[in-house]
Image (cartoon, rainbow, N blue to C red):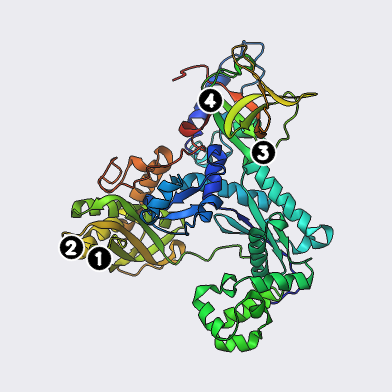
């Protein structure tokens, strides 16, 4: 479906994780700050001050040790529970501007709003500024707003608002003079376009398409032959013709991944088994929340890919269940058994995990004739009891195996974890 | 559901008591949660008897609804200072802070001065904005040259636990 008169907003929190940390710890303001991935491996969020020091997205901490030391960069562990709550509020505020059908929380820090129905009654740029100020006042989070005739255009508008301070964080391509629009499009690399990325940019370059403007001027049908329908759609979108609608219900999950890096190096099989049994149970919890059954499980182990002294060890194994299941005991049993086959002595393991695939809705599953229903029912009662204990007393009160006993050899290291101000025991404290 | 069951027993108990205190007008079921759950299972068990819960469910008090007007903009902070003692704010009290409100003269606010948190009463007069401590042992805060006062949020409520303060 193509529409020429749509209006989309893309609202995006600047440096989300760092900005969240600053709300509850203002001493971080105006200082170079980075937030590390799970287990303090890589920088996954950077303040503008850190970006200015040349710290790249996703860079492992050990590679920037010197910069961190020299410039007193503040290094924090990621506090996902807190970011998730701030994200929920961010999306809720935006949803209050339109109906539920017209918002799409695109990621933890990005949200599309379809504003088509209200265009005539509002000054779009003013609405963008109001949203920005509201989120700043209510949550303390800085955002940029991009406004365009398509989702792709609103993404580019957001990019323009971020890179050009003159826009005061809101860029409205709908009302922008076409000459100005061309000027900005000509400055942005085509690889910045939503859905294009680095993968296609080489091929585009070879065709003389370097900037967003070049791409927007390309002939969609010709490009469809050379690339795909997706590329053609992207070009229409850049021309202000909307082809991608707001998505309301995310398609049901194709797979569930539960894995994490270890705090220290792990070498023993028993430690790995403990860890993988916890990830299997995490994955099971998510599976049950989505009311799915799993037919197939992949278990994997890895050594540290950044260690130049030893070869990278990365092994995985797949196993399928005779009957699709959502029982934690099945997953733990399978994961620990599969681990025996991929474990090798003498390796310093950095990470392990499980992937659940072949997922199907629990309600839609047809059991075969030979199914032992009494057994399935028994397992379901057990799982229901476990779920009940988890929701009433907390996740760590009961488990299969010893994985929640504190301070295991493999526990995550989050040295620089901030408090979670949304928990009674960790509220923000005011000393003055 | 399971949370409500014991309350029902309590209500029965209350109903049987004659109320003597003049200032107690009514006793209502308090569910300190925004999720009001209707005890279906309970009614099944009581089949044949009118459920005493039915009359009371819609009178349930929701503490969140009572204390928090704008959930998305509300934060709870803990006090570790005696500077507002005479305004009733003691150490370990929790404050409900609504960031969506515009701070007015006389409001108790959580504010930032030089990126440090403080809780004080906001005063707006001919001297401009300043922060008043509600304890003679503490100094008021007047802005120095180049200092900026940032209102972090307006305090709307004090949660004071008066028993088992541990």
Q: Which residue is mark 4?
A: A431
The chain that hosts pointer 2 is: A
Does residue A318 appear to the left or right of B71 in the view shown? left
| Vertical relation: A150 (above or below) A333 | below
Tell me how far mark 1 sits from mark 3, CA to CA: 52 Å
Disc nearer the start of the sequence (4/2): 2
| Vertical relation: A37 (above or below) A243 | above
Q: Which residue is mark 3?
A: B70
Q: Residues within 10 Å of mark 4 (few under 14, many from 20)?
A: some
Position of residue A42 measured from the top left corner of the image (x, y, whole percent): 40, 55
Q: Residues within 10 Å of mark 2 (few under 14, many from 20)?
A: some
Q: Secondary structure at mark 3?
A: loop
Respond whether the residues carrying marks 4 and 3 are from the same subunit. no
The chain that hosts pointer 3 is: B
Circles 3 and 2 in contact, beta carbons < 8 Å: no
Most foreground residue, A225 or A406: A225
Q: State the residue at coordinates (50%, 39%).
A: B1
Disc nearer the start of the sequence (4/1): 1
Q: Which label sits on residue A344?
A: 2
The chain that hosts pointer 4 is: A
Q: Which residue is mark 1?
A: A313
Tell me how far mark 4 sits from mark 1, CA to CA: 49 Å
The chain that hosts pointer 1 is: A
Respond whether the residues carrying marks 4 and 2 are from the same subunit. yes
């Amino acid at each position: 479906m193509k529409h020429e008169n749509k209006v989309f907003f893309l609202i995006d929190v600047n440096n989300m994780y760092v900005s969240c940390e600053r709300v509850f710890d203002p001493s971080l303001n105006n200082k170079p700050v980075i937030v590390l991935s799970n287990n303090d491996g890589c920088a996954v969020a950077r303040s503008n001050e850190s970006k200015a020091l040349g710290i790249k997205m996703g860079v492992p901490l050990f590679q920037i040790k010197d910069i961190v030391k020299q410039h007193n960069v503040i290094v924090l562990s990621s506090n996902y529970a807190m970011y998730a709550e701030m994200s929920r509020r961010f999306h809720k505020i935006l949803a209050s501007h339109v109906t539920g059908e017209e918002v799409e929380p695109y990621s933890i820090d990005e949200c599309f709003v379809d504003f088509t129905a209200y265009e005539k009654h509002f000054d779009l740029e003013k609405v963008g500024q109001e949203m920005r100020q509201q989120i700043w006042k209510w949550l303390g989070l800085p955002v940029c707003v991009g406004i365009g005739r398509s989702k792709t255009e609103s993404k580019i508008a957001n990019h323009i608002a971020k890179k050009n301070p003159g826009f005061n964080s809101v860029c409205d391509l709908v009302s922008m003079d076409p000459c100005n629009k061309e000027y900005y499009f000509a400055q942005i690399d085509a690889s910045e376009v939503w859905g294009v990325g680095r993968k296609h940019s080489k091929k585009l370059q070879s065709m003389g398409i370097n900037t967003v403007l070049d791409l927007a001027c390309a002939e969609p049908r010709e490009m469809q032959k050379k690339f795909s329908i997706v590329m053609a759609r992207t070009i229409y979108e850049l021309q202000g013709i909307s082809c991608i609608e707001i998505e309301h219900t995310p398609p049901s999950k194709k797979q569930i991944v539960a894995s994490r890096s270890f705090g220290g190096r792990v070498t023993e099989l028993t430690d790995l088994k403990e860890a993988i049994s916890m990830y299997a149970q995490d994955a099971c919890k998510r599976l049950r929340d989505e009311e799915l059954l799993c037919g197939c499980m992949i278990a994997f182990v890895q050594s540290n890919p950044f260690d130049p002294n030893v070869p990278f060890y990365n092994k995985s194994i797949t196993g399928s269940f005779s009957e699709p299941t959502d029982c934690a005991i099945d997953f733990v049993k399978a994961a620990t058994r599969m681990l025996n086959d991929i474990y090798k002595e003498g390796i310093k393991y950095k990470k392990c995990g499980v992937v659940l695939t072949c997922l199907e809705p629990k309600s839609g599953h047809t059991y075969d004739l030979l199914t032992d229903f009494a057994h399935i029912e028994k397992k379901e009662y057990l799982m229901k009891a476990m779920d009940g204990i988890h929701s009433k007393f907390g996740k760590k009160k009961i488990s299969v195996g010893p994985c929640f006993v504190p301070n295991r050899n493999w526990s995550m290291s989050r040295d620089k974890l901030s408090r979670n101000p949304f928990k009674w025991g960790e509220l923000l404290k005011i000393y003055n | 559901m399971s949370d409500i069951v014991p309350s029902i027993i309590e209500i029965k108990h209350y109903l049987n008591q004659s109320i003597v205190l003049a200032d107690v007008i009514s006793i209502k079921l308090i569910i300190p949660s925004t999720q009001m759950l209707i005890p279906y299972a309970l009614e099944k068990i009581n089949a044949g008897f009118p459920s005493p819960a039915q009359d009371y469910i819609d009178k349930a008090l929701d503490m969140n609804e009572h204390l928090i007007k704008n959930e998305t903009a509300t934060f709870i902070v803990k006090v570790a200072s005696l500077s507002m003692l005479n305004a009733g704010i003691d150490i370990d009290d929790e404050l409900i802070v609504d960031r969506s409100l515009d701070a007015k003269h006389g409001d108790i606010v959580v504010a930032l001065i030089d990126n440090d948190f403080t809780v004080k009463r906001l005063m707006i007069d001919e001297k401009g904005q300043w922060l008043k401590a509600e304890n003679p042992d503490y100094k008021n805060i007047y802005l120095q040259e180049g200092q900026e006062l940032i209102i972090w949020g307006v305090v709307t409520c004090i949660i004071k636990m008066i028993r088992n303060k541990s």
